[in-house]
């Protein structure tokens, strides 16, 4: 195995996690500096996008299964999006 293929294999193992990390930092920064509701929504979108990338085959982590990562990221992403929408538009809250 040469150095280029080893580096490619190591980069492939990370999968969507750098995207989620950078997106989380940007979303939290936006939430702190500008608007907490839309910052939370953007964090949810980033997590849902990470779930889709993981489902599409990104990353080869041996610690967890792809199904576990996808379901976890998707559930947390959707929960953040719903929660931030309920904070932004309180009339959506069930009574």
Image: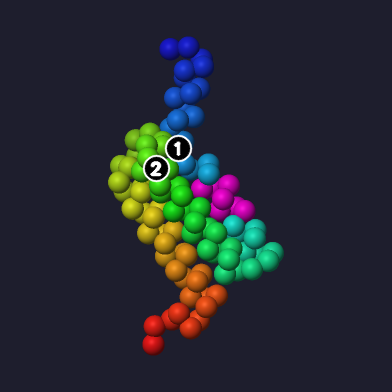
Residue 5 drawn above or below residue 12? above
- The answer to the question of whether label 1 and label 2 lie on touching residues, with beta carbons closer than 8 A, is yes
Location of the C terminus (image quadrant): bottom left
Q: Residue at x 48, y 83 (%)?
A: 91
Q: Position of residue 73 (x, y in %)?
A: 40, 53
Query: What range is drawn magenta here?
Result: 20-26
Residue 38 drawn above or below residue 12? below
Sort mark 1 into few (<14), some (14-19) or many (20+) by Cα contacts within 10 Å: some
Question: Which of 37 and 25 lies nearest the eye of the viewer?
Answer: 37
Q: Residue at x 59, y 57 (%)?
A: 27
Q: Position of residue 60 (x, y in %)?
A: 38, 34
Q: Position of residue 12 (x, y in %)?
A: 45, 30
The label number, if any, that marks residue 54 in the structure image: 2
Residue, disc 1: 15
Q: Residue at x 62, y 53 (%)?
A: 26
Location of the N terminus (image quadrant): top left
Q: CA distance from mark 1 to mark 2?
A: 7 Å
Question: Which of 91 and 33 lies nearest the eye of the viewer?
Answer: 91
Question: Which of 85 and 16 lies nearest the eye of the viewer?
Answer: 85
Residue 60 drawn above or below residue 54? above
Q: Position of residue 4 (x, y in %)?
A: 51, 17
Q: Is residue 46 visible?
A: yes
Q: Please, what secondary structure does the residue beneath circle 2 have?
A: helix
């Amino acid at each position: 195995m040469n150095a280029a293929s080893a580096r490619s294999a190591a980069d492939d193992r990370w999968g969507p996690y750098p995207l989620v990390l950078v997106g989380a930092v940007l979303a939290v920064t936006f939430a702190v500096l500008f608007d907490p509701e839309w910052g939370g929504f953007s964090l949810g979108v980033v997590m849902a996008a990470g779930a889709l990338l993981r489902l599409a085959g990104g990353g080869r982590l041996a610690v967890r299964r792809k199904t576990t990562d996808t379901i976890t990221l998707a559930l947390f992403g959707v929960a953040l999006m719903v929660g931030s929408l309920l904070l932004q538009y309180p009339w959506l809250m069930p009574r």
